[in-house]
Image (tube, helix red, strand yellow):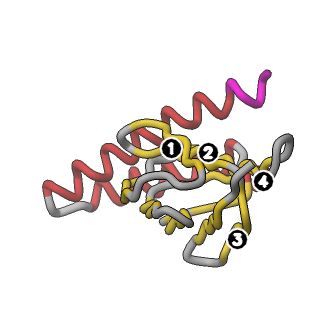
Amino acid sequence: MATFKFELVSPERILFSGDVVSVIIPSIEGEMTILAGHAPLVATLKAGIVFAQTDGSNGKEFFVNGGLVEVNQSSTTILAEQGRFIEDVDNVVLDAEILTAETKLVGAQDEEERKRLHDVLVQLREFKGVFADRKAA
């Protein structure tokens, strides 16, 4: 299987850097799978899970909330506004993220910022439901 370089960077640290077979990314345009040799693109991320397939049967999962992904022929880089290892995410973490977004929304002065924060809240609440269903399975 062809591999490519993948990096997932949060403001605090590099969460992953290495060769992967594929990466599934939650963009605001929809979920997308990146494979080796993918056409170049830049997309905005929404709250969700990034799955990096490291070989034919293993992978790693991460939670991201916002940011950008840049894809070129030989590598994919995610610059996440917030990123965590999936095992570090639970309902308490998601509730805190939602509360932070709600607080920012109340204080937002600019209409464009209010719209962005509203969209973030919708994405976080949607993800919290998906996350709860996933934990229950």
Q: Residue at x 55, y 48 (%)?
A: 34
- Name the mark on residue 49: 2
The magenta region covers 133-137
Q: What separation in Å lies between label 1 and label 2 (alpha carbons)?
A: 7 Å
> Which quarter of the picture shows residue 7?
bottom right
Q: Main SS type for the magenta part?
A: helix
Query: What is the secondary structure assignment of the residue under circle 4?
Result: loop
Q: Amino acid at mark 4?
A: Thr
Tell me which numbered mark, 3 or 4, is placed earlier along the sequence.
3
User: Can you say whether 137 is above or below 18 in the image?
Assistant: above
Tell me which numbered mark, 1 or 2, is placed earlier along the sequence.
1
Q: What separation in Å lies between label 1 and label 3 (alpha carbons)?
A: 18 Å
Question: For mark 4, does the 10 Å Cα neighbourhood hold few (<14), some (14 to 19), or many (20 or more) residues?
Answer: some
Q: Is residue 56 left or right of residue 45?
A: right
- Name the mark on residue 17: 3
Question: For mark 2, does the 10 Å Cα neighbourhood hold few (<14), some (14 to 19), or many (20 or more) residues?
Answer: many
Is there CB contact under 8 Å for labels 1 and 2?
Answer: yes
Q: Estimate the x, y position of residue 49 in percent, counting from the top left.
A: 61, 45
Q: What separation in Å lies between label 3 and label 4 (alpha carbons)?
A: 11 Å
Question: Which of these two is toward me, 124 or 34?
Answer: 34
User: Can you say whether 136 is above or below 28 in the image?
Assistant: above
Q: Amino acid at mark 2?
A: Ile
Tell me which numbered mark, 1 or 3, is placed earlier along the sequence.
3
Q: Estimate the x, y position of residue 46 in percent, counting from the top left.
A: 44, 48
From the image, tell me which residue sits under label 1: 26
Q: Amino acid at mark 3?
A: Ser
- Name the mark on residue 54: 4
Question: Which of these two is toward me, 74 or 87?
Answer: 74
Q: Estimate the x, y position of residue 99 in percent, counting from the top left.
A: 49, 51
Q: What separation in Å lies between label 4 and label 1 (alpha carbons)?
A: 18 Å
Q: Is residue 78 left or right of residue 16?
A: left
